[in-house]
């Protein structure tokens, strides 16, 4: 394995040095699936396009989300930080933002039944955009500053509004095709075919997988309702595969297939109850593969990967040194770090239920620290009431028809949980009190203390207090207006708000002051030469703050 990784490292050094150009990078991101694909040994869903990609890729057997739900997980991906380190732990803080500067946070958060959401102290939670530490950026900003054209099509869900500085394009039309000629691109395509909601939204579609053929996890009863929802999940995976086939075909048509590093992964584990929102392998472990140009390296990789590692790894592959502040570490490229020995994960508020659970996972064992043992292990999240499987499980529970494995989810919490994932793949046998595992328990307990108790963990604060810290007196802070200095028609842009980034557009002096969402905003990284008869329209943003007002700069009479 070490020889394989060493060869991969040498390959990228030679690629960058020989061609003196940065690689194109494509992310194909799906939602809510565990590693239940053929290249992980589950052939239930027929996925010829993913199979073909996997045959030319490195397949990672131990890749994990930082949180078993979308928003906090995606905040880790875009920043390289654990959600607990930057205050993006609660799902969801506000509306998903697909455009810049157009959202007003004004409502009190409600669950999917219309009930008001409260924190652990009973305080109401309002919509907000998380204000993260001022030194933390979306990693795509570093790519843009180093010559990449960055596009996102189209989901963000970062727990904060995506700043203008993060993307050249962030909309339903965003595409690598729009990159200027000879400019390397980083493009993300998000696919929702396997999202939790598609279990009920696709209920009238033809099942392409026979319910009798689906494998049943030990935590589910075996009946028609359960099997039907599992068949819908696998059928949705087949729908996803069709979409992946289309994007790969498009890449090939553009002559880019062998000039692009391709990532495929899911944003967290499976969509079904006792998967999504649960801080076990069923909610955290994801399919993850990487194809390199000309299939230069392929096979299975056992090393641990955290979603916090994606940001520094992409920078490393682009020959950009990752910032030291990142919790994640590069697992490929010129700045590859030493292999991980553990990954960390967090569980706080999911929809209307707040808790605080912290996890450390090594290659074999999963340790869970429950900070509120008075709260139930099972959370009656209203959003998943639409899943027939969920209601079926509750009905069987009420009738005392669940066996011990199926009923484990509903048992009271203990302060600590420890699972041997190799011999207990569904984490149903807590061995925390077994003397045979005392040394491992102590080892992983110490790591959780070091990561989440000795360091800053925003989960220590009640959410209402956290919001008031981020938004003093309930008012969203605002980024200061851009100022400028002009010397010999060379303009330097500045912003007084610490941590703010500046974006600008240079237009003809007769252009209107209003810039459309399709305008090509540039990231300000160095002084700008003002073209004749032109003006600059600039704005600044800091993550979690309101964008600044527009500033117009010109130097003509």
Image (cartoon, rainbow, N blue to C red):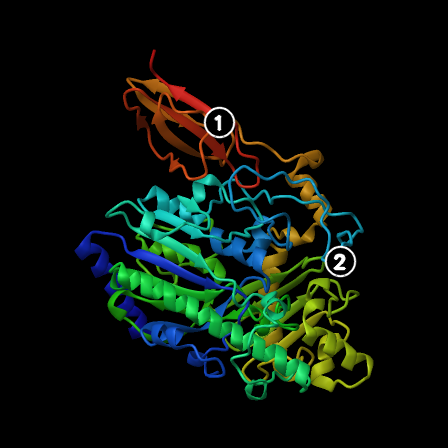
Tell me where residue 227 appears, x and y as whole percent.
Answer: 62, 83
Q: Badge 1: how crowded within 10 Å, few (<14), some, or many (20+)?
A: some
Residue 285 visible in the snapshot: yes
What residue lies at 36% left-to-right and 74% top-to-bottom? 54
Quarter of the image for the N terminus: give it: bottom left
Mark 1 or 2, nearer chain start = 2
Give above or below for 229 relative to 451: below
Q: Which mark is residue 550?
A: 1
What residue lies at 55% left-to-right and 52% top-to-bottom? 157
What residue lies at 26% left-to-right and 65% top-to-bottom? 293
Q: Seen from this angle, which residue lies furthest left?
A: 18
Q: Secondary structure at mark 1?
A: loop
Residues under labels 1 and 2: Cα distance?
40 Å
Tell me where residue 242 appears, x and y as whole percent.
Answer: 42, 70
Total numbered badges shown on the rendered structure: 2
User: What residue would you read off at disc 2?
Assistant: 113
Q: Secondary structure at mark 2?
A: loop
Which of pointers 1 and 2 indicates the residue nearer the eye? Answer: 2
Tell me where residue 390 appears, x and y as whole percent.
Answer: 70, 73
Location of residue 474 by image quarter: top right
């Amino acid at each position: 394995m070490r020889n394989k990784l060493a060869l991969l490292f040498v390959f990228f050094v030679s690629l960058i040095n020989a061609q003196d150009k940065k690689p194109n990078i494509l992310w194909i991101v799906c939602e809510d699936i565990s590693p239940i694909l053929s290249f992980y040994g589950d052939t239930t869903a027929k996925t010829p396009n993913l199979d073909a990609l996997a045959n030319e890729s490195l397949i990672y057997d131990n890749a994990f989300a930082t949180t078993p739900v979308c928003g906090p997980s995606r905040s880790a991906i875009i920043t390289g930080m654990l959600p607990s380190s930057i205050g993006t732990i609660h799902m969801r803080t506000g509306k998903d933002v697909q455009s810049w500067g157009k959202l007003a946070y004004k409502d009190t958060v409600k669950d999917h039944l219309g009930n008001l959401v409260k924190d652990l102290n009973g305080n109401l939670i309002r919509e907000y955009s998380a204000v993260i530490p001022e030194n933390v950026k979306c990693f795509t900003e570093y790519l843009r500053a180093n010559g990449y054209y960055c596009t996102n099509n189209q989901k963000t869900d970062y727990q904060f509004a995506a700043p203008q500085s993060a993307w050249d394009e962030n909309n339903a039309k965003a595409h690598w095709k729009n990159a200027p000629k000879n400019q390397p691109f980083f493009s993300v395509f998000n696919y929702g075919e396997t999202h939790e909601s598609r279990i009920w939204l696709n209920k009238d579609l033809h099942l392409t997988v026979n319910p009798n053929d689906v494998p049943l996890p030990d935590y589910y009863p075996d009946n028609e309702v359960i099997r039907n929802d599992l068949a819908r999940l696998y059928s949705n995976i087949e729908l996803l595969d069709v979409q992946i086939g289309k994007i790969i075909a498009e890449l090939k048509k553009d002559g880019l297939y062998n000039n692009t590093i391709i990532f495929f992964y899911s944003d967290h584990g499976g969509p079904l109850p006792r998967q999504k929102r649960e801080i076990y392998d069923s909610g955290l472990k994801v399919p993850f593969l990487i194809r390199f140009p000309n299939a230069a390296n392929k096979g299975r990789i056992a090393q641990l990967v955290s979603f916090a590692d994606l940001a520094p790894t992409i920078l490393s592959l682009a020959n950009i040194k990752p910032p030291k502040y990142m919790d994640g570490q590069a697992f490929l490229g010129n700045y590859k770090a030493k292999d991980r020995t553990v990954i960390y994960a967090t569980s706080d508020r999911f929809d209307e239920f707040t808790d605080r659970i912290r996890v450390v996972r090594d290659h074999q064992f999963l340790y869970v620290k429950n900070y509120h043992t008075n709260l139930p292990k099972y959370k009656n999240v209203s959003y998943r009431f639409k899943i027939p499987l969920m209601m079926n499980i509750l009905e069987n529970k009420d009738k005392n028809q669940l066996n011990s494995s199926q009923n484990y989810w509903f048992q009271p919490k203990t302060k600590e949980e420890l699972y041997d994932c190799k011999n207990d793949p569904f984490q149903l046998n807590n061995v925390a009190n077994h003397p045979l595992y005392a040394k491992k328990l102590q080892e992983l307990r110490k790591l959780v203390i070091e990561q989440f108790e000795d360091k800053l963990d925003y989960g220590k604060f009640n959410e209402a207090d956290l919001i008031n810290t981020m938004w003093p007196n309930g008012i969203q802070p605002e980024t200061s207006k851009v100022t400028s200095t002009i010397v010999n028609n060379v303009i330097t842009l500045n912003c007084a708000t610490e941590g703010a980034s500046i974006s600008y557009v240079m237009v003809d002096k007769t252009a209107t002051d209003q810039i459309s969402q399709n305008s090509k905003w540039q990231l300000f990284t160095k002084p700008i030469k003002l073209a004749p008869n032109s003006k600059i329209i600039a704005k600044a943003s800091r993550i979690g703050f309101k964008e600044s007002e527009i500033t117009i700069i010109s130097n003509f009479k």
